[in-house]
Amino acid sequence: MALKTTIITGATSGIGQETALALAAQGHALYLLVRNIPKGERLKNQITGKTGNKEIYVLRCDLADLQSVREAADELNKTLFAVNILINNAGGVFQERHLSKNGFELTLATNHLGPFLLTHCLMPLLQRGQARIINVSSEAHKWGKPRFDDLQWQQAYNGFKAYGMSKLFNIYFAQSLAEKYGDKGILAFSLHPGTVKTGFGADIKGLGKVLFVLATPFMVTVQQAAETSIFLATAPRLEQYNGAYFKKKKKVATSAVATDTESRNKLWAISEKLLSRYLVWPVINAG
């Protein structure tokens, strides 16, 4: 049986690391897209040491830097013939408003625009691999609303609301991928991993910090948080759930806003416009 070729972002810590370890143990050939190469190489050695899997590769990709995303995608297109699984796992939440290298609000850039661009640029490989695309979203999407009049949060920035909006966009993106590419063999899902005992969001202050403290008794371990990503990457016969949102390995309902087809289509169009200079099809490995 041929190895599954799997790409995962944000694998050097937390949920991503546990997901990578589990999939490596199942024999997947892993491509770890990381910001920090030395950290990625240490993880590679750790995974190989624990699982015996030597098909682990490290590639630099900073999702907040669109040129970095494009370069990583181009390298993968030159190297690979097909991809079976793409896990858009990396994400960030920021207490204060910052701009990415490309001038986009950092939450939007990291959590939506970067994954949107990466997925688009890998689409030839994903179609060849009849791939599953897995977006790590959050129940935080329930406090998110699409601010199409101010996606950059130039007015009244709120870190939690910006994060919630980006997690809503992860769900929209999975739904649109299922709709646009389902007939080409693509399955796309979004998921809530649970409120996790990691360092994610450790610098949050004020009300956000209070909410984190209140959530502590209900937090799950990193291993538990990774279970749904692993399930969606490996479980058979998920075609009937294409585009769905999962929690604890089961399909669950989203917020009402997350079912708004007009907003979802508008997001796709706006995303293409914002990323237009980077959205050109790559030259791919013909085999």
Image (spheres, rainbow, N blue to C red):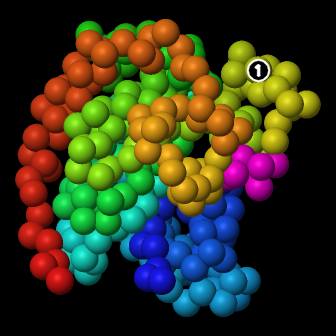
Residue at point 52% right, 75% down?
Answer: 28
Asked whether 169 or 72 is in front, the reply is 169
Residue at point 73% right, 83% down?
Answer: 50
Q: 10 Å neighbourhood of mark 1: few (<14), some, or many (≥20)?
A: few
- Asked if residue 61 lies left or right of residue 87, the reply is left
Residue 66: x %, y % from top left: 26, 51
* Quarter of the image with the C terminus in it: bottom left
Residue 39: x %, y % from top left: 57, 73
Residue at point 61% right, 26% down?
Answer: 252
Residue 242: x %, y % from top left: 42, 38
Tell me, yes or no, if residue 99 can be seen here. no
Task: List the residue tagged with mark 1.
Answer: 211
Q: In this view, does 261 lie above or below 27?
A: above
Asked whether 104 or 12 is in front, the reply is 12
Residue 164: x %, y % from top left: 52, 23
Q: In this view, does 126 lie above or below 45?
A: above
Q: Which range is magenta?
A: 221-227
- Asked if residue 203 lies left or right of residue 39, the reply is right
- Asked if residue 121 lies left or right of residue 110, the reply is left
**Image mark count:** 1
In reply to whether residue 196 is colored magenta, the answer given is no
Q: In this view, does 189 lie above or below 97?
A: below
Dot 1 falls on a residue whose secondary structure is helix
Asked whether 270 or 6 is in front, the reply is 6
Asked whether 125 or 89 is in front, the reply is 125
Image quadrant assignment for residue 177: top left
Type of secondary structure dominating the magenta stretch: helix
